C-alpha cells in the first residue's frame, strides 16, 4: 500500500506541476482582461442576480437553484479539510495563492457559466444538457469532439472516485470519529483492518440519505440544495466571524504570516530554499483552491446549463458568485482561523487541524466547538456528494448517449462508492481527487481559451444593452 501511495503521489505532483498551475492562472488572467475585470465592476450586480430569478426562460431549475446545486458540489470538505491540508503542506502562504487563484477564477467561472447556457441543448426527452462537452463540441467544432469526450471521461472518474464520493464521506467519518471516539475505543475488524463503530454508522447514514435523494435526480437535488446550502454556509460563516472577532488582535500577525509564506520572505529562506517555499505554497494553494471552488474544472457549468434563463451573460455572473462565496469568503475565514491558532504546526492531519482551530478560537467549550464543526462538515460533504452525482451523471450521459438504463445503474455504482469511501486511506484519496481534478481542467481550459473571443463579445453586447435600458437589472 505504501508503494501505491508513493506512485499516486508522484502522479499527483506531475499533474499539478507548475505548467498546469500557470495554465489555470493564465486562463483566469486572460478572461479577466477580456471581460474588463467584470468580477470587480459587476460583483454587486452579480450578487443581485444571484437572488433575483428571471421571470421567464428555458431550463429545468431557477438560476438560484442552479447556483445552489453548484455550491452544493463546491462548498464541501475542500473548505474545511482542503484548506487545512493546503496550509499544512504549503504553510500559511498557501492561503494567499488560494485567494489569488480565486480572484482570477471568478472570471473563469463567469466564462464557464456563460458558455454553458449559450451552447446548451435539449435532448429528445426534453432535458436541458450543457457543460464543457457541449461548448467544446458546438463552440470549437465537431473536430474537437474527442476533447469533449476526454473531459467527460475525466469528469466521470472525478465524481466517482475522487472529489464527489470518497473524499467527502472520508471527511465526514473522520470528523465524527474525532468527536465521538477519538481514542478508537470501540472498533470492529473489517477488510483486514480495524474501524470504529462511529465510522461504520456515520458512513451508513450518509450513504442512505444520499441514496434517497440521488434517485430523485436534478430537481430533488436542487430542492434540497436550495434550502440546506445557504443555511449551512450562513452558520459556518457566523462561527468563523466569532473566531475572528474574539481574536481580532491576532489578525495583523496572521496576515503577515500569510504574505511572508506566499513569497518565501523568511530570514533563512534565500535562493533555492526560498523558491522551494514559494513553490510549495503556490502548488498547495492553487490545487486545493481549485478543489474547493472548482474554477476552471468545468463542473459548475454543468449545473448552470440547467438554469431557467434567456441570457448567457446573466447566468455567467450568477455562476461567478459561487467562487466568491466559496473561496473569498468561506475558505478565507477557515484559513485565518487555522493560521491564528497555529493548528497547522501541531502535527495534525486533515479535519483535526480545523477542529483544533475551532476549539482554540470559539468561546465555547471544546466539545461544543468540535460538534459544531462536525455538523457543518457533514452537511457540506453530504451536499457535495449530491452535486457531484449530477455532474458525473451528465458526463456519463454524454459518453453513452443519454441511455436511461445506464444512468440508473450508475446511480447505484456511485452510491456504492460513497459506501466504501470511509474504508480507504485519506492520503491516497486526496491525491486521487487532485489528479482527476487536474485532468478535468486541461480540456476545459483549452476550450475556454479558444472561446474567449465569444465570451468577450457576448459580454460587450449584454452590457451595452443593459446600459441602454434594453435589459432590466
Image: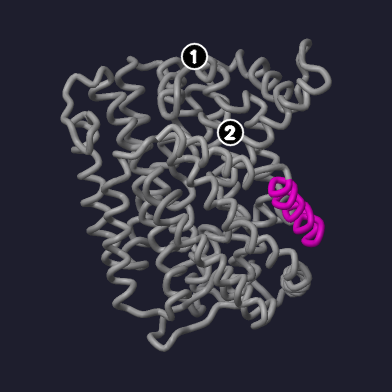
Residue, disc 2: 332
336 left or right, relative to 240: right
Residue 229: percent from the left, percent from the top?
40, 49
**SS of the residue at dot 2?**
helix
| Front position among marks 2 and 1 | 1
Cα separation, mark 2 vs mark 1, equals: 20 Å
Residue drawn where x is 40% and y is 18% of the image: 359
Residue, disc 1: 346
Looking at this view, is 304 or 280 the one in front? 280
Residue 180: percent from the left, percent from the top?
23, 24
Task: State which region is magenta.
Answer: 19-37
25 left or right, relative to 369: right
> Can residue 34 be found in the magenta stretch?
yes
Residue drawn where x is 57% and y is 61% of the image: 298
Label 2 neighbour load within 10 Å: few <14, some 14-19, many 20+: many
In this rendering, the answer to whether 271 lies above or below 388 is above
Amino acid at each position: 500500500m505504501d508503494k501505491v501511495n508513493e506512485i499516486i503521489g508522484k502522479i499527483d505532483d506531475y499533474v499539478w506541476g507548475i505548467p498546469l498551475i500557470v495554465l489555470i492562472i493564465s486562463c483566469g488572467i486572460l478572461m479577466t482582461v477580456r471581460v474588463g475585470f467584470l468580477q470587480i465592476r459587476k460583483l454587486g450586480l452579480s450578487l443581485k442576480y444571484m437572488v433575483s430569478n428571471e421571470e421567464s426562460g428555458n431550463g429545468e431549475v431557477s438560476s438560484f437553484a442552479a447556483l445552489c446545486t453548484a455550491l452544493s458540489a463546491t462548498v464541501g470538505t475542500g473548505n474545511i479539510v482542503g484548506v487545512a491540508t493546503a496550509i499544512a503542506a504549503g504553510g500559511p502562504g498557501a492561503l494567499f495563492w488560494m485567494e489569488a487563484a480565486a480572484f482570477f477564477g471568478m472570471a473563469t467561472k463567469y466564462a464557464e457559466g456563460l458558455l454553458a447556457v449559450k451552447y446548451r441543448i435539449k435532448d429528445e426527452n426534453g432535458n436541458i444538457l450543457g457543460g464543457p462537452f457541449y461548448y467544446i463540441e458546438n463552440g470549437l467544432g465537431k473536430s474537437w469532439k474527442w476533447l469533449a469526450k476526454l473531459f467527460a471521461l475525466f469528469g466521470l472518474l472525478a465524481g466517482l472516485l475522487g472529489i464527489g464520493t470518497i473524499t467527502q464521506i472520508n471527511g465526514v467519518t473522520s470528523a465524527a470519529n474525532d468527536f465521538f471516539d477519538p481514542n478508537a475505543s470501540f472498533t470492529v475488524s473489517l477488510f483486514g483492518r480495524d474501524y470504529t463503530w462511529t465510522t461504520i454508522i456515520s458512513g451508513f447514514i450518509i450513504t442512505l440519505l444520499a441514496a434517497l435523494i440521488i434517485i430523485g435526480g436534478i430537481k430533488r437535488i436542487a430542492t434540497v440544495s436550495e434550502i440546506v446550502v445557504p443555511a449551512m454556509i450562513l452558520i459556518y460563516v457566523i462561527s468563523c466571524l466569532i473566531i475572528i472577532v474574539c481574536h481580532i488582535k491576532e489578525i495583523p500577525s496572521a496576515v503577515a504570516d500569510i504574505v511572508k509564506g506566499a513569497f518565501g520572505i523568511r530570514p533563512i529562506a534565500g535562493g533555492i530554499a526560498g523558491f522551494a517555499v514559494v513553490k510549495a505554497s503556490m502548488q498547495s494553494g492553487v490545487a486545493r483552491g481549485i478543489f474547493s471552488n472548482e474554477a476552471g474544472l468545468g463542473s459548475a457549468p454543468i449545473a448552470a446549463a440547467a438554469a431557467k434563463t434567456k441570457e448567457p451573460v446573466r447566468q455567467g455572473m450568477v455562476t461567478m458568485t459561487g467562487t466568491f462565496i466559496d473561496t473569498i469568503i468561506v475558505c478565507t475565514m477557515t484559513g485565518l482561523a487555522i493560521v491564528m491558532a497555529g493548528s497547522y504546526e501541531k502535527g495534525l492531519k486533515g479535519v483535526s487541524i480545523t477542529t483544533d482551530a475551532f476549539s482554540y478560537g470559539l468561546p465555547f467549550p471544546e466539545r461544543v466547538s468540535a460538534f459544531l464543526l462536525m455538523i457543518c462538515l457533514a452537511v457540506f460533504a453530504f451536499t457535495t456528494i449530491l452535486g457531484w452525482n449530477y455532474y458525473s451523471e451528465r458526463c456519463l450521459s454524454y459518453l453513452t448517449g443519454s441511455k436511461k438504463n445506464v444512468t440508473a445503474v450508475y446511480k447505484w455504482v456511485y452510491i456504492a462508492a460513497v459506501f466504501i469511501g470511509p474504508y480507504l486511506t485519506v492520503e491516497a484519496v486526496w491525491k486521487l481527487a487532485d489528479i482527476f481534478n487536474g485532468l478535468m481542467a486541461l480540456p476545459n481550459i483549452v476550450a475556454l481559451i479558444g472561446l474567449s473571443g465569444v465570451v468577450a463579445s457576448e459580454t460587450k453586447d449584454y452590457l451595452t444593452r443593459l446600459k441602454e435600458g434594453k435589459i432590466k437589472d
